[in-house]
Amino acid sequence: MLTIISILVENKPGILWKVTNMFRSRNFNIESISVGVTVDPEFSRMTITTKGDEKYVQQIVKQLDKMIDTVEVRRLDEHKTVYRELILFKIKVSKASDSMEINKLASAYGAKVHDAKKDSIMVELTATPDQINAFEELAKPYGIIETARTGVAALQRSGA
Amino acid sequence: MENMIGARALMVALEKEGVKEVFGLPGGANLPMYDELYKSNIRHILARHEQSAAHMADGYGRVSRKPGVCFATSGPGSTNLITGIATAQADSAPMVAITGQVPVKMIGRDAFQESDIIGMSNPCVKYAFQPRDPSEIPEVVKKGFYIASTGRPGPVLLDIPKDVQQNEGKMTFPHEFKIRGYHPWTDPDIANIEKAIDMLLSSEKPIILSGGGVIISSTFPELQSIAEMLMIPVVTTFKGKGSFPENHPLSLGPIGMHGHAEANKLMVEADCVLAIGTRFSDRSIGTFEEFEKRLKIIHMDVDPAEIGKNQTTSIAVVGDLQASLRIMVKMLMKKAIKQTEENKWIKHVKEVKQYWRENLKLPKGEMTAAKILRKLREVLPKEAITTTEVGQHQMWASLFFDVIHPGTFFSSTGLGTMGWGFPAAIGAKVARPDVPVVDIAGEGSFNMTENSLATSVLEDIPVIVFLVNNSSLGMVAQWQRTFYDRRMIGIDLKNCPDYVKIAESYGAQGIRAQSLDELGRAIKAGLKSDVTTVIDIPIDPDDDVLPFVAPGTPLKDMILPS
Ligand SMILES: Cc1ncc(C[n+]2csc(CCOP(=O)(O)OP(=O)(O)O)c2C)c(N)n1
């Protein structure tokens, strides 16, 4: 099961390293991670996704909570949370029809097309990790030249 | 607000924390600190190796329950501290380690004696600070001491660049501060304490497992009241050894790899355990799965992250142990629970205990581990503090040296650091100059930090080194005999050096004891002596520590002497 953990940390140097070092030293795994400063510049928010059973996730949350640099650690419920990841794909265009098809695919997924060249197209998709994986499967037959992916950002819905 | 240089502010801040002694060794990057130390009222105790300085601070901290302070320079000085810091972390000992660092402008340029000590120490400190401006020092010291000594204690590192020590800043010494992400005090959940009592009362074979947390929180009378009111036998972890008087009728002693036979046997029979201040280390419980499958576990601890880490619990009570146990005692008093009847379980417990006390087979001879340690107990006053090194002698101490005054026994149990016991004994003696301090040592371990003899003699900190000398790295030898078909390698120390001469060359007293009478006299001489005494006690190098629970096997498969 995908678990999303949202961590408010002090916006100070070295905190990202300490958090990831804790994951490493305790034998926990990070699926994705994203970090950015919050509206209040004293804090950053880190969003970490991981997979594992209940006991494992509970331990991760407790160990994060124990860290002195983490101000708030919350486990977000997938169903009550808006969570998105951004990915850029550079996809190969081998024949004229490819370009049309990729454009169609992109619009079906609500992705933006940025850099349409004769032999490649760049597509930007903001979606859930599942949707991104689905898109990737469909784009694979054309040939994916390269990708860059951000990791999940997530916020709980109001009143949830 | 006052103007002063960072190093001066450091001393003022340390004095405000009540620091009277620091253990350390100087070098280029901490000279400004030493220059201010020279001018301050704080006593400097010179160690001959930074690792020992850290162990001294650790011993001081465990005994006084206030952070011990050690100083080291940058680069090798700071890396030498690491073993000491990691040892303190593994045993949750309060410590503030203060290192010099290259000037801020030089950081990251591979300067002479630059080491990234913040990076290297990260997994083994509770927290680390590197102030970049002199004016940060007062607050950083205050926070450092607070973090090191509250909640689950641990080592804090202050790494101070040389220019931050040398430059002037505007100093305010804060009374209050906030650390947004640190909340060491949780109120214990009263409802869960109530449930715990019900669970204990409804179980047929309850047992108390008392861990190091009971010693750290010094919550001995509360533990004893609970055990007595509920008539529940008490086993301890090795770190919890002596958290309950070992001459008490309900005491069974430590469980674990080299636990007492009766403790391991009865632990295996119990149906419900009240585990207090323990992290369920593999050395204590054998296998994780076995333990939780069989038992209802009530777990009390100050560290929420310990709940469910190694064992699934039925009831958890998170909070300061003293607070939790006090609430439990009050509840029991209110309920007027006082079990005076000896039920079936207690009768059985007493029988098993008596059987193993009388029938555990011990090696024959005069100078065996059991006999020399019982001699030590006989001669040593009950309030004396003992530390140990790491190896067979440590486990023999666990088996044959009963701790009667709670909280007087200390060992490197988590990291298992050879060389810890002697400097830690020196630190302990600084904290408690009024009581005798004895390091129960193996010669292999003592060899690692024996140069602390210089510190103990020159600084007038007399302790006794009770050297159980089997002229080998005995514990390793035992594993080679047991698991590697007697292929003995790297364990023979060939009686080198001569520890009586070593002691004498440092100006300490060295005595060799070859009979129990000589030993008794030597201990008495040590107790009377103004200088440190090393009692060299030759024993048979072939003796094993038994009982023995092989690593990765359950307690029930304990190997007994045949
Ligand atoms: C620093 C360090 N190195 C290695 C070990 C592994 N080790 C554990 S016990 C032991 C032998 C200790 O010998 P000694 O101090 O003479 O005690 P004995 O077992 O003989 O009583 C060794 C080498 C350790 N615990 N610590």
Image: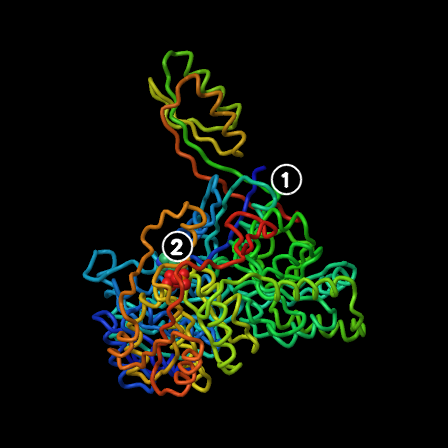
- For the N terminus of chain A, the quadrant is top right
Q: Position of residue B441 (x, y in %)?
A: 40, 69
- Identify the disc placed on residue A79: 1
Quarter residue B54 falls in: bottom left
Chain containing the residue with disc 2: B
Q: Residues within 10 Å of mark 1 (few under 14, many from 20)?
A: few
What amino acid type is highlighted by mark number 2? Answer: Ala
Pick the front one: B383 or B338: B383
Q: Residues within 10 Å of mark 2 (few under 14, many from 20)?
A: many
Quarter residue A54 falls in: top right
Q: Is residue B363 above or below residue B288?
A: below
Quarter residue B249 falls in: bottom right
Residue B360 in the figure: left or right of residue B512 = right
Name the front one of labels 1 and 2.
2
Farthest-out residue, left: B112
Residue B121 visible, this orientation: no
Q: CA distance from mark 1 to mark 2?
A: 58 Å
Q: Position of residue B293 (x, y in %)?
A: 66, 47
Is label 2's Cβ within 8 Å of ligand 1? yes
Residue B407 visible, this orientation: yes
What amino acid type is highlighted by mark number 1? Answer: His
Chain containing the residue with disc 1: A
Which residue is label 2 attached to?
B477
Q: Are marks 1 and 2 in contact (CB under 8 Å)?
A: no
At 39% from the left and 33% from the top, the residue drawn is A148
The image shows a total of numbered marks equal to 2
